[in-house]
Amino acid sequence: VHETSTVTVGFDWKPDLWPAEKIANLMRDSKLCPAPMGFLAPESFRLWESLEAGCIPLVDAVDISRQDLILYDSQYFISFFNYLDDTYLDPHRPRRRFDPILVHNWAISAPNIADILYRDYEDLEHFQSAQIEWWLNLKQ
């Protein structure tokens, strides 16, 4: 997990934010972790923090276009994880058995995410286990 001494480095206006160690521990104890897009690309360090902590990243279902050019679409993360599988995963190891959870609108998704947690908890456990196994295999 990306850790610094505090998450408020350089921000004296908000000294009550949690230290990075507390955030890292929360992520390790979580099933789902938000991983919103970065400034220049759909993924940010939050994606990698989530994978490293063992929680399932919730990523933006990005649809970014400029004029007639589609820069990123909602298949970005699925394609990205497939690329990681094809490039870095030992072909004799199990392939990824999950796709990332895409969030289309962060403001209205919280109740839906809560439903996932309470209604499909057993499926979420299997999903999380598959993701952790994939991440560990990918790092070897």
Image (spheres, rainbow, N blue to C red):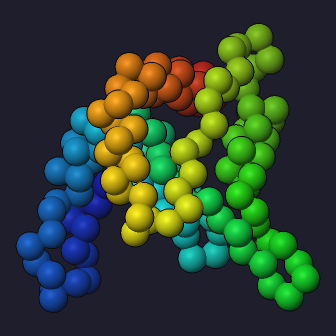
**Residue 115, percent from left and from top:** 35, 41
Q: Quadrant of residue 96?
A: top right
Residue 45 visible at all: no
Left/right of residue 85 with respect to residue 49 in the rendered view = right
Q: Quadrant of residue 128?
A: top left
Task: Assign the C terminus to one quadrant of the image.
Answer: top right
Left/right of residue 22 with respect to residue 136 in the rendered view = left
Residue at 25 percent across and 35 percent down: it is: 29
Classify 118 as above or below 57: above
Classify 115 as above or below 108: above
Furthest toward the right, the residue is 68
Q: How many marks?
A: 0
**Residue 2, percent from left and from top:** 38, 53
**Residue 81, percent from left and from top:** 70, 41
**Residue 6, percent from left and from top:** 21, 65
Q: Viewer-proximal residue, 59 or 134?
A: 59
Residue at 32 percent across and 45 percent down: it is: 114
Left/right of residue 23 with respect to residue 129 in the rendered view = left
Classify 11 as above or below 92: below
Q: Viewer-proximal residue, 7 or 58?
A: 58
Residue 90 visible at all: yes
Q: Quadrant of residue 65?
A: bottom right
Residue at 40 percent across and 69 percent down: it is: 107
Furthest toward the top, the residue is 92
Q: Viewer-proximal residue, 126 or 105?
A: 105
Q: Viewer-proximal residue, 41 or 33?
A: 33
Residue at 57 percent across and 76 percent down: it is: 39
